[in-house]
Image (cartoon, grey):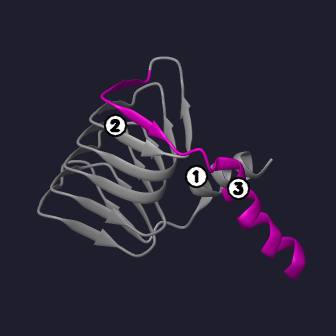
Amino acid sequence: MFSKKSKVELDQQVISTFLSEGCVFDGNMKAPAFVRIEGQINGDVTIDEGLILGEKGAITGNVATKEMIVYGTINGNINTHSLEIRSTGRITGDIKTQVLQVETGGTHNGKLAMSAGVAEGKHKHAKPELVNA
């Protein structure tokens, strides 16, 4: 239940930073909120909240974020809590995540390490919401 909700939320989040198709960014990128990339980044990407990499988007470098949806191409390592590789997504590099979803057609070439604490992480997030509600 919680994983479906968080996936919908990432798709519905207000995007604070947008790199449009045709833009090329050379260097490391850091952002505090939600980012959508349709262009190309040559460098490491660190996003505090979430990242959506569009179909024409490409990252050559390592990525660290909480949630991530990949429609485009990544050549580098990924460290995230939740990762979705869509049918057009292509990842070459190592992945470290707790939650992974791959649509038919999506590809990953590299090592995959998944944390055993997935259920614990969900409960930790759920308890404060229930207590505060």
Residue depth check, mark 3 versus mark 1: number of the one nearer the observer:
3
Q: Which residue is mark 3?
A: 120
Is 95 on the left-hand or right-hand side of 66?
Answer: left
- For label 3, the SS is helix
Amino acid tagged 1: Asp
Query: Can you give x and y, in whole percent of width and height, for residue 98 in the image?
Result: 55, 46
Q: Is residue 60 above or below residue 71?
A: below
Any part of residue 133 in sight: no
Query: Mark 3 or mark 1: which comes first in sequence?
Result: 1
Q: Which residue is mark 1?
A: 11
Any part of residue 47 in sight: yes
Query: Mark 1 or mark 2: which comes first in sequence?
Result: 1
Query: Can you give x and y, in whole percent of width and height, for residue 118 in the image?
Result: 64, 48
User: In this orientation, which residue lies closer to the viewer: 114 or 28?
Assistant: 114
Q: Residue at x 58, y 63 (%)?
A: 13
Query: Can you give x and y, in whole percent of width and height, for residue 125 in the image?
Result: 72, 66
Is 47 on the left-hand or right-hand side of 74?
Answer: right
Tag of residue 72: 2
Q: Residue at x 28, y 71 (%)?
A: 30
Tell me, yes or no, whether the two marked residues, 3 and 1, touch with CB atoms within 8 Å: no
Q: Residues within 10 Å of mark 1 (few under 14, many from 20)?
A: some
- Tag count: 3
User: In this orientation, which residue lies closer to the viewer: 4 or 125?
Assistant: 125
Query: Can you give x and y, in whole percent of width and height, for residue 12 in the image?
Result: 61, 57
Label 3 – label 1 distance at C-alpha? 24 Å
Residue 52 colored in magenta in the image: no
Q: Residue furthest front?
A: 116
